[in-house]
């Protein structure tokens, strides 16, 4: 008797490949991946190289593959997206992040297949309304994203909530609003890598790194704050949801504790065994008016749903990332 399949879209990407690693190690399901790998020299394929995936699907063949395996699929974990907040083609963003997600939702609903998908903290916009993950339609509709990426995620959250309220939902569905995720398997992302990964080569070399000056009286230079979440925690929540078929809704996924960029950089230098060397550079005027000085996930709803594993602290997460990955000749998970 064949085992059930969990399909991870975007499974060769950053968060997706860490989910694949967790699910392959768990061993309960066969794990299939839908993604593009791009040029071999970009090394995105290395994000998957250590994990015995059961199948690999090109995105353009996704729905044909789903139809051919409809009786075998336990769940779709939909992490595939245009994730760049600076992508200039809004049509491309909407097609990838909303239209494809909508079609996957409809397929999963029709085929009684569970769906877990990536939303984003970018749906909260400037944070003026806070970061509480109420997922009723009115609360979701009141959010005001600041870019096309955030808008695409907001639009699909509304679609999910609207259809769930109408009884047109997969037998389990969950959206995860990821905050500032960092960790292994980011190298292919270029300028969209997390600050930790982007700064590591300079820190490893004992060189100075740059942080933005502050233009807000409540925050010192480098004191701008984010909810940094270790990617292992993100993958763990997805695996927990696959074991908890009764949990549905849209949830924040962060650490629940805001920390400053200065804290992050000091943790990196400490893990590298080097003295911090930090320089401050003026924040570009083009982003000053829309810059977020504070994000912090309210994690109460996920806890109320039954997830009670403590988050990895920033210092522990950075230490683990540096020791097990960044400082190693092969930094891939």
Image: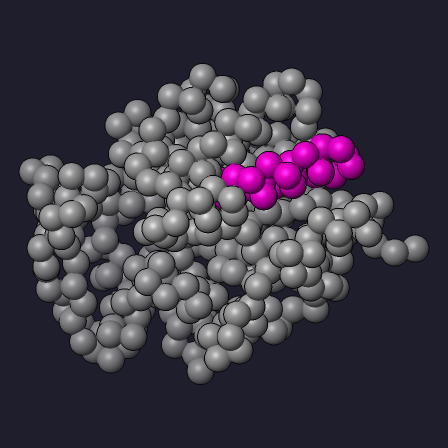
- Residue 297 inside the magenta-drawn segment: no
- Residue 112 inside the magenta-drawn segment: yes
**Quadrant in the picture for residue 252:** top left
Pick the front one: 59 or 153: 59
Where 1 sits versus 179, above or below? Answer: below
Q: Is residue 218 visible?
A: yes
Residue 326 in percent (x, y) is at: 40, 72
| Residue at the bottom extreme of this rendering | 329
Pick the front one: 145 or 306: 145
Residue 11 in percent (x, y) is at: 59, 58
**Quadrant in the picture for residue 53:** bottom right
The residues colored magenta run 97-119
Where 144 sits versus 197, above or below? Answer: above
* 32 left or right, relative to 20: right
Residue appearing at x 59%, y 60% in the figure:
35
Residue 148 in percent (x, y) is at: 37, 41
**Quadrant in the picture for residue 29:** bottom right
Q: Is residue 232 visible?
A: no
> How would you classify the magenta stretch by its main secondary structure?
helix
Residue appearing at x 61%, y 18% in the figure:
165
* 320 left or right, relative to 115: left
Where 94 sits versus 49, above or below? Answer: above
Residue appearing at x 46%, y 38% in the figure:
153
């Amino acid at each position: 008797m064949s085992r059930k399949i969990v399909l991870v879209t975007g499974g060769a990407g950053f968060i997706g490949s860490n989910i694949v690693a967790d699910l392959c190690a768990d061993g309960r399901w066969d794990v299939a991946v839908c993604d593009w790998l791009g040029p071999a020299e970009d090394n995105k394929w290395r994000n998957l190289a250590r994990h015995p995936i059961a199948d690999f699907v090109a995105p353009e063949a996704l729905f044909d593959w789903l139809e051919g395996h409809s009786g075998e699929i336990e769940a779709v974990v939909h992490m595939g997206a245009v994730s760049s907040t600076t992508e200039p083609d809004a049509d491309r963003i909407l097609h990838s992040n909303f239209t494809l997600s909508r079609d996957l939702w409809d397929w999963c609903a029709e085929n009684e297949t569970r769906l877990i998908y990536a939303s984003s903290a970018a749906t909260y916009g400037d944070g003026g309304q806070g970061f509480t993950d109420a997922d009723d339609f009115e609360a979701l509709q009141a959010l005001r994203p600041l870019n096309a990426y955030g808008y695409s995620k907001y639009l699909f959250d509304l679609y999910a909530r609207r259809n769930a309220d109408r009884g047109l939902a997969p037998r389990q569905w969950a959206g995860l609003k990821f905050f500032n995720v960092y960790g292994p398997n980011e190298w292919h992302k270029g300028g969209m890598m997390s600050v930790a990964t982007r700064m590591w080569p300079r820190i490893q070399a004992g060189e100075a790194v740059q942080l933005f000056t502050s233009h807000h009286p409540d925050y010192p230079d480098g004191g701008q704050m984010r909810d940094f979440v270790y990617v292992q925690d993100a993958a763990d929540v997805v695996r927990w949801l696959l074991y908890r078929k009764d949990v549905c809704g849209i949830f924040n996924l962060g650490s629940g504790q805001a920390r400053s960029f200065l804290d992050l950089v000091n943790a990196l230098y400490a893990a590298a065994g080097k003295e911090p060397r930090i320089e401050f550079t003026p924040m570009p005027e083009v982003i000053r008016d829309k810059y977020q000085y504070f994000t912090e996930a309210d994690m109460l709803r996920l806890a109320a749903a039954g997830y009670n594993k403590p988050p990895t602290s920033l210092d522990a997460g950075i230490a683990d990332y540096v020791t097990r990955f960044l400082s190693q000749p092969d930094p891939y998970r």
